[in-house]
Amino acid sequence: MRTPILIFSLLLGSAPAFAAKPCDELKTEIAAQIEANHVSSYTLEVVANDQVGERTVVGSCDGGTNKIVYTRGAAAAPASSAPQPAATAPANPGTTAPAPAPKS
């Protein structure tokens, strides 16, 4: 008699683990919890399970196929393969103001 009750209890307790919550919804909930703790500089990123690496996992979504990882600190700049533009030159490079004369 105890075995069926034990099995039922284990299945009931593990039901939330099998919930397939959408990643965007879970990410929004986690962000709200982080911001409630007065943390303003962080990033949350949805990654595939095999792309987690050494990052801190704070959630699992889409039926366990993706993880939400947390990075503390400033938001990362978006990865781009395009080179950064050079500083712009003055409109008229030959027309610079003369330096002021030294006072005697």
Image (cartoon, rainbow, N blue to C red):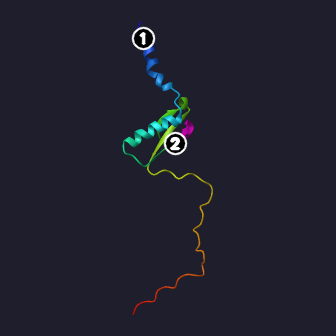
Q: Does residue 92 sit above or below 101 in this rendering?
A: above
* Foreground pick, 87 / 11: 87
Q: What stretch of residues is rendered in magenta? A: 46-51
Using a 10 Å C-alpha cutoff, classify the residue at mark 2 as few (fewer than 14 neighbours), some (14 to 19) or many (20 or more). some
Tell me which label, 1 or 2, sits earlier in the chain: 1
* Residue at 47% across, 35% down: 59
Quarter of the image for the N terminus: give it.
top left
* Foreground pick, 35 / 53: 35
- The residue identified by callout 1 is 5
Residue furthest to the left: 37
- The residue identified by callout 2 is 45
User: Where in the figure is residue 100, as x and y percent of width and height?
Assistant: 46, 86
Q: Does residue 12 sit above or below 78 in this rendering?
A: above
Residue furthest to the right: 82
Residue furthest to the top: 1
User: Where in the figure is residue 52, as x and y percent of width and height?
Assistant: 52, 40
SS under mark 2: strand
Q: CA distance from mark 1 to mark 2?
A: 40 Å
* Residue at 58% across, 69% down: 88
Q: Does residue 55 sit above or below 16 in this rendering?
A: below
